[in-house]
Amino acid sequence: MTYDILITGLIIIAQILAVVVPVLISVAFLVYAERKVLALIQLRRGPNMVGPFGILQSFADALKLITKENIIPSGSNKIVFILAPIITMVLSLAGWAVIPFAPGWVVSDINVGIMYLFAVSSLGVYGIIMAGWASNSQYPFLGALRSAAQMVSYEVSIGFVIITVLLCVGSLNLSKIVLAQQTVWFAIPLLPMFIIFFISALAETNRLPFDLPEDESTLVAGFFTEYSSASFVLFFLGEYASMILMSSMTVILFLGGWLPPFDVYPLNVVPGVIWFTVKVIFILFLFIWVRGTFPRYRYDQLMRLGWKVFLPFSLFWVVATSGFLVYFDMLPN
Amino acid sequence: MIIYSLTFYLFSSVAVLSALMVISAKNPVHSVLFLILSFVNASGLFVLLGAEFLAMILVVVYVGAVAVLFLFVVMMLDINFVKLREGFLQYLPFGALLGIVLVIELGILFLTDRSSNIYNNQTPLQPIVNEVENTKMIGQILYTEYFYLFQICGIILLVAMIGSITLTLRDKGGVKRQNIVSQNTVDASTAIEKKKVKIGEGI
């Protein structure tokens, strides 16, 4: 009896490691890829010294950062200050529990998978708010306030985009959402929603052009100004891991998850996990591309875009989609 | 089953302890953070009951949105908590009375409602995927049986929303706003005015 529990526990831990370790490694390569792509956009060479083509650069950076001294400001609220990066990191990894990489390749295939992802991504704001408040310093505090307002605003439109997709699927289970796209990926009939979701994902992960919470030209480094060494690494890893998480969410909702683009011979023998990875890399490339080409939004413009453009439009699209589905009797089951 | 009870005791004890910390923590921001911890644990309890939709809604609505704004306000306001605590003993009898009434009501519920039999309810640790999803069940009941009540809830929320907007909306004069449409439609003929200035006279 107890032996069984032990075995089940070990299997669960092995499954978690099988997801978390590749995610952390891909974070390292994502950082490298970002620096290389940005360098290409700006006609530079990028990192090219550590390892062949500089491929080990992020590992060197991580080692350097971790071996440095961890400074905790004397005026800070120490427990919250230390908890904040840990929460950021844990939340960016927790979402991976429900991501289906291929048919059946999922740690926990729960009914409300998409709600879980939405909940976890909306909790991400706490790491930032806690960091900004616990630092007891002006720049981090401003960064935290900006982040709180920004993430709450963009969650609203993300919620409506998810509702539109769910109307077409009839289930909150992520595997069923992917399987519902066998005839056509949702990116095609719901193209405007795909674009809104992508832009909101940029805002939700605090990426350029919406990186107002860290905004180095006005706030030094925003919410993590006071962080150093390992706690800084945790924020950094957390940001990139949640970037990959949001890309996977985009792929699952709009680009057919593990499904090949066409269900024909040479394409459908490729394993699903490879299609999934290729699509996630494509979305991540878009993230980096946007970062390299767009200027940062001003804060009031960011709020205006969220509340006055995306919210009414996505609300309208929810009504239009449900009207269309009801009128043509295409509602799922 | 042993894992089920262990997780139940973990979630419930952390929920109760953090709820205690909400009212006893000195720092208001810590109070809000403990409130969030308590919410998250309550949602864990919902998951154990097999009510996964309610659990997620609790996290999304209360933790993801309401508590963020709560934290926002508590962080921004400069509240003097020593002053706030002065009336503690004065309000204690009233608070205790409310608590006792609640406990008695809960007790009556436990003593009378034997049919629900919550102690022998063998809920599985993880909701089974093949069952009718409780999202669907909630929808089927909410939009048929309780349709009018649901609509009334919506109207109450709408009234509250309009009320809070009218209370806070003030049109201060002299605020410069960006009109993006007019900015984008500017061209040389409307933006630049040519004038012939005579020497020694100015405009």
Image (cartoon, coloured by chain):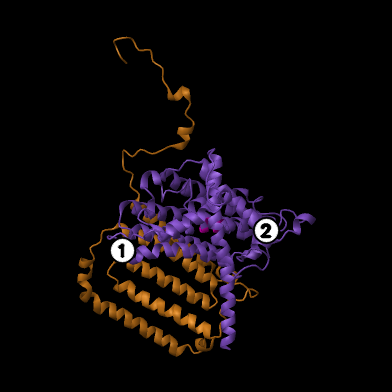
Chain colours: A purple, B orange
Q: What stretch is highlighted in magenta?
A: A241-246
Q: In this view, does B41 lie above or below B199?
A: below
**Residue B93 left/right relative to B194:** left
Give the quadrant of residue B157: bottom left
Residue, x 30% and y 61% (percent of image)? A76
Disc 1 chain ID? A
State if disc 2 and disc 1 touch (CB < 8 Å). no
Residue, x 56% and y 61% (percent of image)? A23
Crowd rating for badge 2 (residues with CA inside 10 Å; few <14, some 14–19, many 20+) = some
Give the quadrant of residue A250: bottom right
SS assignment at label 2: helix
In this orientation, does residue B28 appear?
A: yes
Quarter containing the N terminus of chain A = bottom right
**Residue A243 left/right relative to B98:** right
- Which percent across, then down, holds residue A225? 36, 53
SS assignment at label 1: loop
Q: In this view, does A290 lie above or below A258?
A: above
Q: Which of marks 1 and 2 is nearer the N terminus?
A: 1
Amino acid type at circle 1 is: Asn
Magenta highlight on residue A242: yes
- Which percent across, then down, holds residue A147? 41, 54
Q: Which residue has dot 1 on it?
A: A77
Q: Which residue has dot 2 on it?
A: A274
